[in-house]
Image (cartoon, helix red, strand yellow):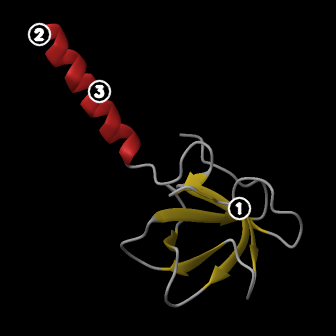
């Protein structure tokens, strides 16, 4: 009985540990890949995003080139893969904008 209880507790704690990562290890948020054409909007966004300097969920490199890697975003006015609105609180995920390699942070 104690073994079952301990195992249940470990599974419960592990689910909390992974639940706070909005961008998954395959670089998706709610099933949407976090690379490609991104439109910045003031309303009707797909994601609320907060820009930070530390503790980011995704490292973003804005580019004019190919956007095939995790975190590579091309800012556009149409034909977007998803829309973001920049916020100061209540974000879906946090990003750090860089001018070098994008992707998931080492955590």
Query: In the shown orientation, is residue 32 left or right of residue 30?
Result: right
Identify the residue shown where x is 60% and y is 47%.
105
Say which residue label 3 marks: 11
**Residue 84 locus on image (x, y percent):** 57, 77
Say which residue label 1 marks: 35
Query: In the shown orientation, is residue 73 left or right of residue 66?
Result: left
**Residue 25 locus on image (x, y percent):** 58, 42
Tag 2 near tag 1, CB within 8 Å:
no
Q: Earlier in the sequence, mark 2 or mark 3?
A: 2
Say which residue label 2 marks: 2
Judging depth in this view, the residue of 52 and 43 nearest the camera is: 43
**Residue 62: numbered disc:** none
Q: Earlier in the sequence, mark 2 or mark 1?
A: 2
**Residue 64 locus on image (x, y percent):** 87, 73
Query: In the shown orientation, is residue 93 left or right of residue 26?
Result: left
* Relative height, residue 40 to residue 30 (above, below): below
- Mark 3 Cα-neighbour bin, 10 Å: few <14, some 14–19, many ≥20: few
**Residue 66 locus on image (x, y percent):** 87, 63
Q: Secondary structure at mark 1?
A: loop
Q: Earlier in the sequence, mark 3 or mark 1?
A: 3
């Amino acid at each position: 009985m104690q073994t079952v209880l301990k195992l249940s507790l470990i599974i419960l704690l592990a689910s909390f540990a992974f639940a706070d990562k909005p961008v998954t290890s395959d670089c998706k948020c709610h099933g949407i890949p976090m690379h490609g054409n991104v439109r910045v909007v003031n309303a009707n966004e797909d994601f609320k995003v907060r820009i930070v300097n530390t503790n980011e969920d995704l490292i973003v490199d804005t580019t004019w080139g190919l956007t095939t890697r995790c975190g590579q975003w091309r800012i556009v006015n149409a034909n977007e893969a998803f829309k973001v609105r920049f916020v100061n609180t209540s974000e879906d995920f946090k990003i750090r904008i860089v001018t070098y390699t994008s992707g998931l942070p080492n955590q």
